[in-house]
Structure formats: structure tokens, C-alpha cells
Amino acid sequence: MLAYQHAYHAGNFADVHKHLGLFALVRSLTGKASAISFIDTHAGRGLYPLAAKETQKLGEYREGVERIWRERRKIPVGSPLGEWTASLAAQQSGAELDCYPGSPTWLGEALRPQDRLTLFELHPAEHRFLADQAMPSTNNVTRRHADGLKGLRQLLPVSTPRLCVLIDPSYERKAEYDEVAETLAFVARKARHAVVMVWYPLLPAGRHRGMLERLQTAGVDKLWRSELSVRAPAAERGMFGSGLLVRNPPWQLDQRLEAAFTDLAPRLAEGGTHRSEWWTGEI
Ligand code: SAM
């Protein structure tokens, strides 16, 4: 089942949470010279023109990136959110917000000559867009039209001294929560020092809890957990929040992200909240 297309949701509050986290993580890792293999298991299109009919249809970016964009001149320049908005501005064709960069673009713009980036995308049309319009292959960027979690397992161990993985599925299938937990446990065994970021939705059904339980059972440690909510969990359907797990975050990244997300949440929604913790198994 490949019905999901991220263009319908591009730039929503969850994207801002995830991509600000990814941006700060990558900046922190590239502060040291040694080479990094970046792997994005679910890449999407890489770049989302906001005028596209899919993106206009739900207009979720209006409650996400557009809110931050409108406030950008009030955001402290040296803060993670200030640096992220400056980078976002540099990626626009002019002075207006006209496109939203996906994870491959956020990873690609930080890549140094010594680094590698592998992008997995299974949807044929999404992969084609990625290839033709967002991320052409270069010496250090490889695109794979293949399953991201299987592909990640096959790439281990990598040849660079460091590894950073983003796991960001659409969770169209319930089984994906378990598959993500199993893959993270596998990576933790095979590449102990790998830095892994996993995104998950906060839905009224609370399906992410099963994933957290599996991680606990598998003994996956060194996990920092961040959850940003834009409304109270409602009885009806619909994502009310966005979750991130980061395994092996670089030194002090937890504190920087805690401050950045606490600042971000009320900018995204009146009453928006953020909580984070070193996750020890309590769900
Ligand atoms: N990471 C992207 C970003 O932040 O810009 C968004 C990714 S979107 C949430 C999930 C993507 O995974 C979709 O583009 C979907 O087509 C793709 N996908 C679904 N199943 C997949 C699989 N088994 N392997 C790789 N990609 C898959």
C-alpha cells in the first residue's frame, strides 16, 4: 500500500518539529571533521512547491511553516530556530515562502565532501520527482528506489567512521510501528554508536505506544524522546502531536532541542506544548 503522499502534508507542524530537530542534529554532527554516512529511509519528494495542488488542498503548511515564516524577524538569530529559518529563507527562489524543503534537502545542504547520503523512496512517482527535480545523484548522494528499512539493514556496517539515520515512515500500515522498533534495535546492535532519529505521529489511538514497548523489550537504550502537541488529544481522528526519538544524540543536543522546541510549540499553536525526557521505558 503506497497511498500516502507527503505533498498533502508538507510544511505542517510535524514537519517543522522534525526538520528543526534534524537540522540541529546535523549541524551538531558536522561540527567534527570525521566523515558521516547519512541514510534517509523514507525520503519523499525532497522538495515541496507550496503552490502544488496537493499541498494547497489541505493547506496544512499554513498552521506550520507559514506561522514561523511570518514571525521570522522576531526569532533570535543565533538560536536553532533562527538558524533554521535563515536556512529556509536561503532556499526560497525570492523573498516569499514558495517551497518547503523535505528531509533529503535538509540533509543534502549540510553535506561535506567527506560525507555520504543515501536516500530510499519506494513510491515510483515520489522517487521520480526526487531524482528529476530535488536530488540528482552526485558523487556523494545515492538514491534508491527500494524499501528503506530493509535497505538500511543491508548497508550496515558503513565505511565511514560515523552514521546518522533518519527513519520517517508514513505509518500507513499498523505493522510499521513494530518494523521501526525492530529496525532500530537491529541498528543499535550492529552499529552501536549510530545516531538515529525516528519520527512518529501522536494520534488518539496512541499506536506509537506499541513501538515504545517493543524498544523497551529489546533493551534499546540511550534514547531521548521529544513530543510536541498542538492540541489536546481528541476523541476523533487526527494527529494532535509529533514525536521524535533520538538515539545517541550528540553532547548537549538534548538541552538545545528542549529549549528550541519549548520556544517552537506556542509559536505553532496557541496552547502548544512540548515535553522531552531521556526515555527509560515509561510510556
Ligand atoms: N522524510 C520525508 C521528509 O521529511 O521530507 C517525508 C517522508 S513521508 C512521511 C514517507 C515516505 O515514505 C513517502 O514518500 C512514502 O512514499 C515513502 N515510503 C513508503 N513506504 C516505504 C518503504 N517501505 N520504503 C521507503 N519509502 C517508503
Image (tube, rainbow, N blue to C red):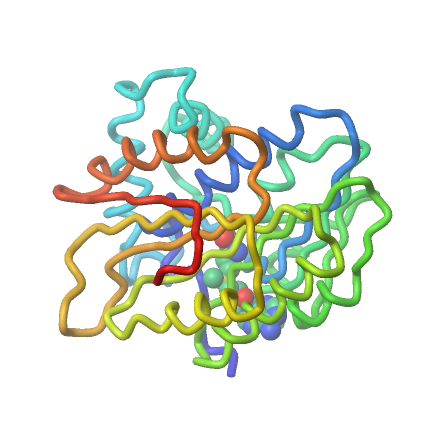
Q: Which is nearer the eye, 283 or 253? A: 283
Residue at 44% from the left image edge and 44% from the top image edge: 100
Q: Quadrant of residue 67?
A: top left
Q: Where does the image place residue 198, in percent across and percent down from the top left?
A: 51, 56
Would you say residue 126 is visible in this rendering?
A: yes
267 in relation to 48, above or below? above
Q: Where does the image place residue 63, in percent across and percent down from the top left?
A: 24, 47
Residue at 25% from the left image edge and 40% from the top image edge: 265
Q: Quadrant of ligand 1?
A: bottom right
Q: Please identify the residue farthest to the bottom as the structure is shown.
A: 1
Q: Which is nearer the eye, 42 or 162? A: 162
Q: Where does the image place residue 124, in percent across and percent down from the top left?
A: 62, 72
Q: Where does the image place residue 58, in percent across and percent down from the top left?
A: 27, 61
Q: Please identify the residue farthest to the right as the structure is shown.
A: 159
Residue at 31% from the left image edge and 57% from the top image edge: 56
Which quarter of the figure is the C terminus placed in? bottom left
Residue at 37% from the left image edge and 35% from the top image edge: 258
282 in relation to 192, above or below? below
Would you say residue 125 is visible in this rendering?
A: no
